[in-house]
Image (tube, coloured by chain):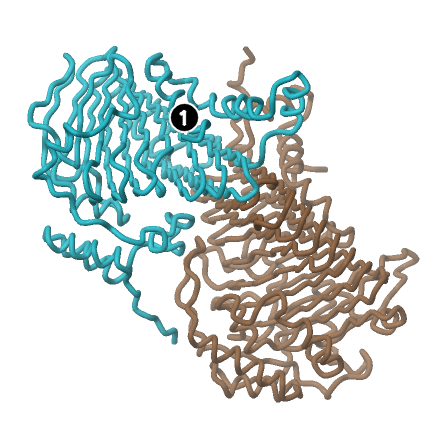
Amino acid sequence: MAVSFPVRLGPAENTLIEQLKSVGADATAERIAVAGLPTRRVEAYHYTDLKTLLRAVPPMVDGSATLELALKAGPLPLQVAGAHHIAITNGLVPSDLSAPSGVTVGRAQGGVLSTRDDILVHLNGALAKQSLALTIERSLDQVIQIDHRIEGEAAHVADALKIFVADGAAATIVEVFSGSEVAHVGNHATYVALGKGANLTHVTVDLSAKASSHFATNEYHLAEDAQLRTLVIHAGAGLSRTHLFPRYEGAGAHGNITGMNLVADGQHADITMDAAHAVPHTTSQPLFKSIARGRGKAVVQGRLVVARDAQKTDAKLMSQGLMLSDEAEILSKPELEIYADDVVCGHGSTCGKLDEDSMFYLMSRGIPQAEAETMLVRGFIEEVLDPIEDEALSEALHMVVDGWLLGK
Amino acid sequence: MADYADIPTLKENIDRETVDSVLALDVDKYKYGFETDIESDMAPKGLSEDTVRFISAKKNEPEWMLEWRLDAYRRFLTMTEPTWAKVHYPQIDLQDMYYYAAPKSSPAPKSLDEVDPALIAMYDKLGVPLREREILAGVERPKVAVDAVMDSVSVVTTFREELSKVGIIFCSISEAIREYPELVQKYLASVVPVTDNYYATLNSAVFTDGSFVYIPRGVRCPMELSTYFRINEKKTGQFERTLIIAEADSYVSYLEGCTAPMRDEAQLHAAVVELIALDNAEIKYSTVQNWYPGDKDGKGGIYNFVTKRGDCRGANSKISWTQVETGSAITWKYPSCILRGDGSRGEFYSIAISNGYQQVDSGTKMIHLGKNTSSRIIAKGIAAGFSDNTYRGQVSAHAKAKNARNFTQCDSLLIGDKCGAHTVPYIESRNGTAVFEHEATTSKISDDQMFYCQQRGLNEEEAVALIVNGFVRDVLQHLPMEFMVETQKLISISLEGSVG
């Protein structure tokens, strides 16, 4: 009875179809041709309508000039003192890889993520040519910093990273995304598997140019008693979206999934989490903070799915938004999907401006308004930054936040 | 440390108590499941322009109304069924049902004496007073004016004269279309547009009856108004339309109840309810939804796809929805408030209980458009058996909604390990001065709570009763007195046998 209309494709979709066909990914190309990029009707993209937001896609990156560009590129926007650096420039993993002792690094072909019904995952799987594989065999003191850079002319880049943390090992890995001031599209994928009792702190910081679009998909598998702390910071690209898929697969696994959207005029940042508590006795505490000023738009979607037999799950999701201007937008969709009865699950979501009483308190003690605001904003963020144990990393992250606060 | 070993775990507790008592609500014991043999006048089966014309002709509707319906029907043909809700059901065959069924009786009974006695007996059985008995055995009962709708027509409306003395219009919507066309034309579909959604558009094309309420300026309605819906015929869809208009400075409290016979085929109920509150007006709308939920294997039951929306059009107006959802095989219902007037307020209190194979996807929308608007949402879901119970709610502040304020709390209680409880809130703040708070929890009754109560001398049953009672109390206390009794009976799923 109903009449359906074919989807009208835009320039971004047409470019993507061409790029996919050129690498033989006909199925994914067909999918875009039929359904187009996801709109708000697709629940996972409810607030990030890719069809509207992603107007154009630049040509696929040309690998030939990469080395030259890498040499010419400016300093890194974020440097963790004493960290071991691995650079992935324009999606290319260098051949002369080095690693601290206890870590094996290698290069592999193609995508790293599990297949799932998500267009960015499909795109990454089809277009990422190389992946970097890191195996952490024993606990590390040194932070590993992976620098994803997109340099030169506007380019579409897909790259991938695979991290294994052996049973009982502990590590801190930071991924930093940056690049030249043009309209790049970066599509990054990170697959993380934690062994029994492993402990990983995984921080991803987007500091790409405002003209560019940044997409990342991070998939985590946690074995028994594995401890994961993640921190996603969006503070760069005009359009950024990080999709997190933590899976708690062993009893005693625990995840502190945290994230921060820092948006100003014309920026749209989205942290989406789909967490699966698959077995009994797992816990998680996702915490997301968004700060928007100007006409910035921040999105947090968090979904906790507790499987039928995942009894004794304890999961609490919190999403907090702070609006520093009248025009800012903060959109949040915390979801619970629960099939087990003996669980304690909850979520909270708040959103508002700076507390007037606190402002009054500070200003009545002679602190100028701007400074008082900064103090309160820092306090708001601290809950996410404070648990980062590595001092050098913590300092670097504070600098990112301060940079944003100063309007850099 | 206290020794918890000899305290039975909560699960056993709930299983015995509540699951037992959930059975009370169960399907096989659905006490309104009888069928009444009343001769009916039916439209030909199926949906077509002719059906729409037939309904309009049966209702003696003016030409404009027929055109309005036909327009809705044509638009309906271009629409598709929404799929975003967390409910699953076989394709509904819109051609395999009747869109009009009316009890055959002498045209327009002048008094109750002319109404088919079988019909009055049926309502008596349902406990709905159609006779204007004011004093019963020396006990003064609060007066409730009732509009009884069976299948496609309004059978009788009580207390009309008394209400008309203060200028209140309370009648069936078909009557209103004939008698007060200017009011209907002005307000119909002004809150739920014709093409709002698939089911609302279908309703616009084929709605058969429902209630119409008009409260004039400055009048406080002297009694509760109530509509009682009953589906009686087989293979019949019920499409009712309710329109309530509260002029400036007025107040009305409105109750809605509904039941249906037990049948093993699913029946469709797609209603539209529109509320309009002008300056300083207040509308309180309460529902006890007790449609037949299907049998214990999930066969039959009512598919309840309802669009309910209130428009706080005037400054400082207030609309409050209270709902107790225990029936229906599938519930798809989001009573919402559009907070248009500055300083207006919306409230939503809900208890949704699901058992057997029931699927509930219900919640609300609070759309803040005006300055200084506020809203409050309290939703309690209790899932048992094989049911799925989803709260889905949207709170949004428009860029001009300065100082919008919302507080939302939704709690779910799971009883048994075959059911699911889900929460899907959409929180959209497009204004820096808006303050939104949302809180949701899912749990079973904690051992700590039980221990605390038992340590103070309550036995298990009392403790569970106390805790479950507390769980839904926030909502219960917002129900009008008249409904409390019925509601408590329905909620006895968790309280029966544990109190007194």
Mark 1 neighbour class, 10 Å CA radius: few under 14, some 14 to 19, many 20 or more: few
Judged left or right of residue A283, residue B4 is right
Q: Secondary structure at mark 1?
A: helix
Whether residue B59 appears in this view of the structure is yes
Q: Amino acid at mark 1?
A: Gly
Whether residue B260 appears in this view of the structure is no
Expressed as whole percent of the image width and height from the top left, the position of residue A15 reads: 20, 55
The structure residue drawn at horizontal position 51% and vertical position 49%, both measured from the top left corner, is: B392
Q: Is residue A301 above or below residue B116?
A: above
Expressed as whole percent of the image width and height from the top left, the position of residue A362 reads: 63, 20
Q: Is residue A386 above or below residue B36?
A: above
Q: Which chain is cyan?
A: A
Expressed as whole percent of the image width and height from the top left, the position of residue B1 reads: 54, 10
Looking at the figure, which quarter contains the C terminus of chain A? top left
Q: Is residue B366 above or below residue B95?
A: above
Expressed as whole percent of the image width and height from the top left, the position of residue A30 reads: 19, 59
Give the residue number, with chain letter if any, for mark 1: A403
The total number of labels drawn is: 1
Q: Colour of chain B?
A: brown
Marked residue chain, label 1: A
Looking at the figure, which quarter contains the N terminus of chain A? bottom left
